[in-house]
Amino acid sequence: MQNLQLSFLFLYLVMIISLLAKERCVSLQGFTNENLSTQERKLVLNCTATLPCREKISSVTFMGILRLSETSSELLAFTNDKHIAEKSGNKDILGLATDSFFNANGESYLSVSYKQDRNAQPNEIDCIVRGFDSSGELVIMSDTLKYKPKICSDKNENIKKYCSSTFSYNKRKYCFSNLSIANVSEAISYCNLMGGYLAEIDNRDEYLVIQSQFNNAVEKYSDLMIGGTDAAKEGTWIYQNSLKPVSYFDWSQQQPDNSQGREHCLELKRMYNSRMNDEPCFNLKHNFACEIPAE
């Protein structure tokens, strides 16, 4: 009897460990941003697959976000080894926008945002990751977001909630987050909730203002993520929001170095005299800077 109990305990522990591994491997986050003045509601979804996926998946071939309702389902967007994000299914989704970074080794994200139809809300949304394990067997992993996202207040309330410091320059407001995020898609989502985007440094004057605020911040950040990625093509840096080429650089010595072939996002790094450095887009513990245009 004791051996049977131990066997059940062992199976239970294996099941719990498996579930935890799944949550670390594939994650779906959702943010609902409601503009109280225009009555517009926007849903932002982030599907991520990170390095622990290597425990079960040696190569990822596909990521997708599937929206489910009582009567139908549709694939909102997917990304694959061609490094593109596309939507599939209903073509009249208002304001649908996608962003993605795809790495077959398991560091990938897919972000989707669209205007919500208040009268046709889905029951749940799935983040699906497909790949192969070390033996070549097909593996499908997923995470589900039950459709009860928290309705966020207007952007000014979110600025108060998520910013440790703010300042203004050239008719724009800037926020240094009080959050430490794990990947770039989280930073993009929080900036979106504040009515902005990851700070896009356009010229030397703007850079010096942000750098000075970074140096003098009460909360001594070690790393501050800003807008800029070369995930699509190594060495070709673009802003994640405007998709325009990054127009100003002040790299620290011997940077960018794309260490281990994994550094495709842009930051200011205090230990590098608060100058620019390339960094991974995942497995981070970074604060970030948002740029919020004037209304």
Image (spheres, helix red, strand yellow):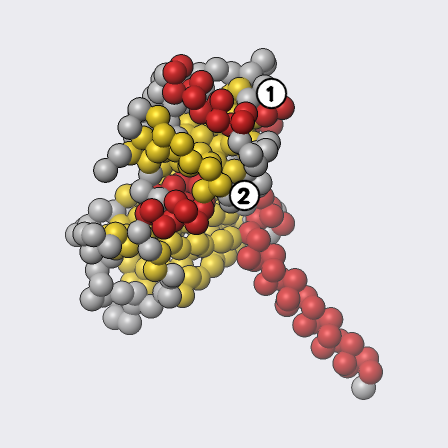
Amino acid type at mark 1: Tyr
Q: Secondary structure at mark 1?
A: helix
Q: Which mark is residue 272?
A: 1
Q: Quadrant of residue 28?
A: bottom left
Which residue is drawn at the image coordinates 35% and 56% (left, top)?
152
Q: Is residue 214 above or below residue 179?
A: above
Q: Is residue 261 above or below residue 166?
A: above
Which residue is drawn at the image coordinates 39% and 16% (left, top)?
205
Q: Which mark is residue 213?
A: none
Is residue 265 in view from this perspective?
A: no
Q: Nearer the viewer, residue 112 or 66?
A: 112
Q: Is residue 50 left or right of residue 166?
A: right
Q: Is residue 98 above or below residue 19?
A: above
- Disc 2 designates what residue? 180
* Label 2–label 1 contact, CB within 8 A: no
Q: State the CA–CA distance, disc 2 to disc 1.
A: 20 Å
Q: Residues within 10 Å of mark 2 (few under 14, many from 20)?
A: some
